[in-house]
Image: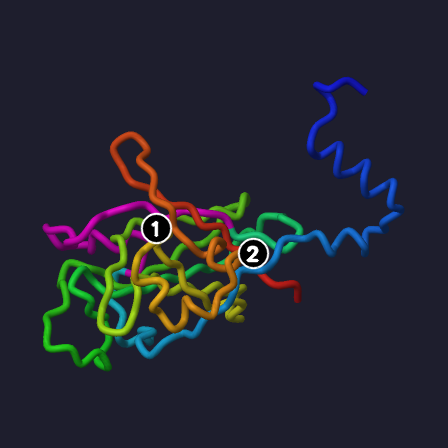
Amino acid sequence: MTNSNFTRRGILAWALGALGLSAAGRSALAAAPTPSATEGPFYPTQPMRRADVDNDLVKIMGKVHEAGGEVFTLRGRVMDADGQPLNGMRIEIWQCDMNGKYLHPGDSQNIDFDAAFQGFGHDITGTDGSYEFRTIKPVTYPGRTPHIHVKVFDGETEILTSQFYIDGHPANDRDRIFGRLSQSEAKAVSMVFTQVEDRTEAQVDVILPTA
């Protein structure tokens, strides 16, 4: 076997074969599932949501102005523990606006909610497991580091509730929920922002637990 053909995949396959690992044994090498997290008190129930609940939280249908805040594209793939893409999964996100206020009557902060911000949205994964949202970078509010809430459904069945964070944000270490994560778990749910042409992006893949 030449060096050019001795790929990482080839090395792994050779090693597994040499060890005599069965398919069941190989499953131990499957990716760790995305860590779950509390739903929190501000998940918007159906009556609370705006009529427009698509995957663009920055632009509400029928409104002239877009939401305030730093706009970015959140994308990724939803996969099983073996790395296989999952088609047709419903992924929801919700978060506070640029002022730290949620679209929820339980948020009693004496500040106005940005009327141009959707606050909640959903997308359906494609055949490659991909999802995409246009939203704003999350901000701090009293007691919490910046984060975006996430839920994944298979049909009507809720599979995962989690939270995404800003990689390296100084408030992370003081956050009670982020602080429960191991280093590898924190990395799995951290958003690293990159510039792609004229837009800012972050990619977070979601690994669902084995049923």
- Residue under pointer 1: 133
Query: How far across and down, in percent of the image, does residue 161 sit?
Result: 46, 68
Inspect the image, locate mark 1, and give the three-letter code of the amino acid beneath it: Phe
Q: Secondary structure at mark 2?
A: strand
- Residue 207's tag is 2
User: Callout 2: few (<14), some (14-19), or many (20+) C-alpha neighbours within 10 Å?
Assistant: many
Q: Secondary structure at mark 1?
A: strand
Q: Does 128 appear above or below 188?
A: above
**Quarter that holds the N terminus:** top right
Specify the segment rendered in magenta: 53-77
Residue drawn 61% across and 63% down? 209
Which numbered disc flags the more N-terminal residue, 2 or 1?
Answer: 1
- By what rule are the colours in the image chosen? rainbow
User: Callout 1: few (<14), some (14-19), or many (20+) C-alpha neighbours within 10 Å?
Assistant: many
Q: Does 73 appear above or below 184?
A: above
Q: Total of numbered circles in the picture?
A: 2
- Using residue 137 as the reference point, say whether residue 177 is left or right of it: right
Query: How far across and down, in percent of the image, does residue 107 sit?
Result: 21, 78
Q: Is residue 63 magenta?
A: yes
Nearest to the observer: residue 50 or residue 91: 91
- Using residue 89 as the reference point, say whether residue 123 is left or right of it: left
- Between label 2 and label 1, give the one nearer the viewer: 2
